[in-house]
Amino acid sequence: MPNQSFAHLLQRYPRIVEEATRFVSHEHLAGMLEGSKDSLGGPLTLSCGVPRNGSSSLSITGAEWVNTDFDFLGDFALFFPPSSLIPGVDLVFEPINRLARHLVEFQIQGGTPSHAQSFHIEGPMGLSEDVSITQTQLISVVVDVVPGSTGNYTVSLSQIDINPQNASWVFRWVRVSSIV
């Protein structure tokens, strides 16, 4: 059997690859946070079908359709701008450990593989980052410790640079992990 690239497998079996990367990447997550996989706290995973967990919550703005069922399509939000609202996802989460950094990962599926889509991420401590994707991808960001914070953290992902060739996209889930 010939060696097949990860990109080929992702195109041919997107649901299988999506589920595999959802649970297998603890070593990668710990590496991004400069710790061992045994020290990884969490993860907290929220989706359209599970938008709340304790005081943590997920809100969707500007979506054309939100599927909260766990049917053959899975739970997801479909964005097809233009919309009267800026298309995006807002995550409010209780820190797993207030003395640790947190890795926040948004699982996004681009609607048009041939055109890049741009997103903006904002969060605590001046976190502001622009990213571009072309296929199904995890958009990851590290949230630093907020000294003296006693409340929840908020991280927002919004679509920017919207044009008709790259407007549609799908949000699947968001995962939060930390070093404990």
Image (tube, rainbow, N blue to C red):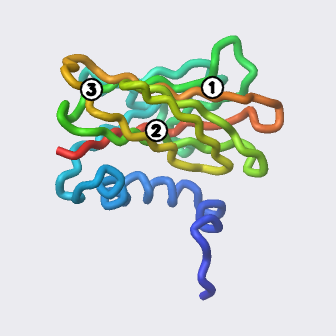
Q: Can I make out residue 67 in this image? A: no
Examine the image and state in which quarter residue 119 appears.
top right
Is disc 3 placed on a helix, strand or loop? loop
- Residue 137 lies, with reference to residue 25, above or below; the image says above
Q: Mark 3 or mark 1, which is nearer to you?
A: 3
The residue that mark 3 highlights is: 146
Q: Amino acid at mark 1?
A: Trp
Q: Is residue 10 left or right of residue 68?
A: right
Examine the image and state in which quarter residue 12 appears.
bottom right
Q: Amino acid at mark 2?
A: Trp
Lower sequence index among marks 2 and 1: 1
Asked if the residue at tag 3 contacts the one at tag 2, i.e. Cβ–Cβ closer than 8 Å, the answer is no
Which residue is drawn at the image coordinates 50% and 29% (left, top)?
128
Mark 2, residues whose alpha carbon is within 10 Å: few (<14), some, or many (≥20)? many
Residue 60 picture location, percent across and down: 52, 22
Is disc 1 placed on a helix, strand or loop? strand
Which residue is drawn at the image coordinates 59% and 82% (left, top)?
3
Which is more toward the observer, 138 or 9?
138
Name the outermost residue toward the bottom.
1
**In the rendered view of the protein, which quadrant contains the N terminus?**
bottom right
The residue that mark 2 highlights is: 173
Badge count: 3
The residue that mark 1 highlights is: 65
- Residue 121 lies, with reference to residue 134, above or below; the image says above
Asked if the residue at tag 1 contacts the one at tag 3, i.e. Cβ–Cβ closer than 8 Å, the answer is no
Q: Can I make out residue 39 in this image? A: yes
Q: Mark 2 or mark 3, which is nearer to you?
A: 3
